[in-house]
Image (cartoon, grey):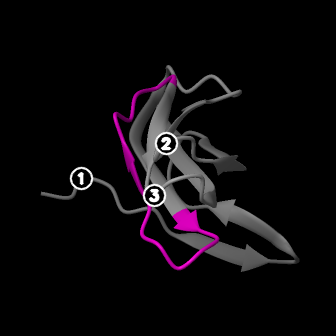
């Protein structure tokens, strides 16, 4: 059951959240080593709920996140491929 739906409106060139609290986002790039890499969040996600991490491969191979915690996650894929990530979470 979905308790909250996050919607965003673009108004006057700024994104405004329509849910209470703050939305934390972080993005970055990574290079896999032996098919995985641990990524630590630089922002404090300890007070977030509904944390979502998205991985995007810079190659044609599939990559996916695993072991997602408020401290970081592991990106998995093939060899030494490169990719990008986006982490989004609502604060409590």
Disc 1, disc 3: CB below 8 Å? no
Q: Earlier in the sequence, mark 1 or mark 3?
A: 1
Q: Nearer the viewer, mark 2 or mark 1?
A: 2
Q: CA distance from mark 2 to mark 3?
A: 7 Å
Location of mark 2 (residue):
34
Most prominent secondary structure in the magenta stretch?
loop
Q: Residue 12 occupies which quadrant of the picture?
A: bottom right
Q: Earlier in the sequence, mark 2 or mark 1?
A: 1
Q: Give the quarter of the figure containing the N terminus.
A: bottom left
Left or right, 57 with respect to 78, comes to right
Q: CA distance from mark 1 to mark 3?
A: 36 Å
Disc 2, disc 3: CB below 8 Å? no
Q: Is residue 46 magenta?
A: no
Location of mark 3 (residue):
78
Left or right, 78 with respect to 5, comes to right
Q: CA distance from mark 2 to mark 1?
A: 39 Å
Q: Give the quarter of the figure containing the C terminus.
A: top left
- The stretch in magenta equals 56-71
Secondary element at image label 2: loop
The crowd level at tag 3 (other Cα within 10 Å; few <14, some 14-19, many 20+) is: some
Secondary element at image label 1: loop
Disc 2, disc 1: CB below 8 Å? no
Location of mark 1 (residue):
3
Left or right, 22 with respect to 70, comes to right
Residue 20, position as x, y percentages in the image = 51, 45
Secondary element at image label 3: loop
Q: Is residue 41 above or below residue 82?
A: above
State how many labels appear.
3
The crowd level at tag 1 (other Cα within 10 Å; few <14, some 14-19, many 20+) is: few
Q: Is residue 50 above or below residue 84?
A: above
Which sits in the foreground, 18 or 36?
Answer: 36
């Amino acid at each position: 059951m979905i308790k909250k739906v996050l919607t965003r409106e673009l108004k006057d060139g700024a994104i405004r959240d329509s849910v209470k609290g703050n939305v934390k986002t972080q993005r970055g790039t990574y290079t896999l080593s032996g098919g995985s890499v641990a990524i630590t969040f630089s922002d404090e996600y300890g007070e977030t709920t509904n944390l979502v991490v998205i991985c995007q491969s810079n190659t044609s191979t599939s990559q996916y996140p695993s072991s997602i915690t408020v401290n970081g996650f592991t990106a998995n894929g093939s060899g030494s491929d490169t990719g990008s990530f986006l982490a989004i979470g609502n604060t409590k």
